[in-house]
């Protein structure tokens, strides 16, 4: 087997290796939090880093999803929605700035595997 | 201001006694809900245009938005249910109390306006919550009408907290 053959044979292995890496690094999931009756449902949501969370407002007036210093949806109108991609692990307590008696928590867990370079 | 709050309180207290058959029917409840919201929309609009205080203005604007949202939903529901909102003594008193409040507030300016508007908002939301708990929810027969009132109740609690927070700020 010459060097070129080795390279050729190596390619499928490299592809396989990447496939395994991708498997360990599962595709980001999508989550939903419903806002209804001046409440977040579920009130606490745990996601993996990189997942996205969409808040859907089913109340007839605006709400916000605001974690001071981390994220802020600003006003989400009646029947509106807002999506946030959870990039940074941590525990985020959030409120609606318009109705501060509304409280929710987003927990973002880090990925076990290292993110591939360039990500 | 004290007199106006008293009138508003009397109007809502009357809600419990003004109905001979033990309480308002659904058509009357629908009318009370829409009227109560409209009263606060009118006061909010005035605060939005008249106040010079950014927080009071923002509160007034939110009252217009939130209570308009509730009324839009309530109006859609009564249409769906085929209920015709029915005028009643409680609605009449609410309407009169609201009109008197707006008339009085229009004579005030600056800090005095802000104080009396916010004081009235505190009293108003306390009384509406009381009416929701003692009159509207216990008497509503239709599950969707009852559900709507239950769902918006926490927003009234948030408004009351917000108004009280403004009240203590303005009092300083």
Image (cartoon, coloured by chain):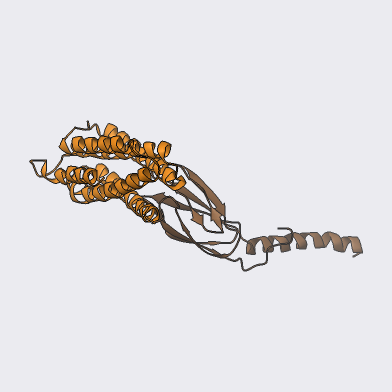
Give whichever of A72, B56 is nearer the camera: B56
- Left or right: residue A89 versus residue B74 is right
Q: Tell me: residue B42, above or below residue A65.
A: above
Q: Left or right: B75 with respect to B9? A: right
Picture residue at 72% right of the left edge, 64% below the top: A17
Is B61 on the left or on the right of B130, as rendered? right
Which residue is found at the position 19% from the left and 35% from the top? B92
The picture quadrant where one finds residue B53 is top left
Farthest-out residue, left = B20
- Indicate the chain coloured orange by its letter: B
**Front residue of B152 and B164:** B164
**Looking at the image, which residue is at 25% across and 47% down?**
B128
Quadrant into which the N terminus of chain B falls: top left
Asked if one can make out residue B72 in the rendered structure from this viewpoint, the answer is yes
Q: Quadrant of residue A117?
A: bottom right
For residue A25, above or below residue B103: below
């Amino acid at each position: 087997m010459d060097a070129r053959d080795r390279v050729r044979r190596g390619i499928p292995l490299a592809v396989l290796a990447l496939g395994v890496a991708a498997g360990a690094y599962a595709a980001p999931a999508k989550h939903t939090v419903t806002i209804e009756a001046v409440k977040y449902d579920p009130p606490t949501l745990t996601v993996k880093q990189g997942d996205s969370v969409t808040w859907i407002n089913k109340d007839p007036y605006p709400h916000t999803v605001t974690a001071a210093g981390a994220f802020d949806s600003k006003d989400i109108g009646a029947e509106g929605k807002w999506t946030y991609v959870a990039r940074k692990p941590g525990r985020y307590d959030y409120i609606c700035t318009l109705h501060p008696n509304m409280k929710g928590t987003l927990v973002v867990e880090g990925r076990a595997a290292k993110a591939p370079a360039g990500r | 201001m004290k007199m106006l709050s008293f009138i508003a309180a009397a109007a809502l207290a009357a809600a419990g006694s003004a109905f001979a058959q033990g309480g308002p029917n659904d058509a009357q409840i629908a009318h009370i809900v829409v009227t109560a919201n409209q009263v606060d929309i009118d006061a909010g609009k005035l605060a939005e245009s008249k106040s010079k205080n950014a927080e009071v203005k923002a509160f007034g604007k939110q009252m217009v938005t939130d209570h308009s949202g509730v009324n839009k939903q309530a109006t859609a529901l009564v249409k769906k249910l085929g209920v015709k909102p029915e005028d009643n003594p409680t609605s009449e008193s609410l309407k009169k109390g609201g009109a008197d409040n707006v008339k009085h507030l229009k004579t005030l300016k600056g800090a005095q306006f802000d104080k009396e508007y916010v004081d009235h908002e505190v009293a108003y939301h306390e009384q509406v919550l009381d009416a929701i708990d003692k009159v509207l929810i216990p008497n509503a027969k239709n599950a969707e009408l009852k559900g709507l009132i239950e769902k918006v109740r926490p927003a009234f609690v948030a408004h009351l907290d917000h108004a009280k927070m403004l009240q203590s700020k303005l009092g300083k």
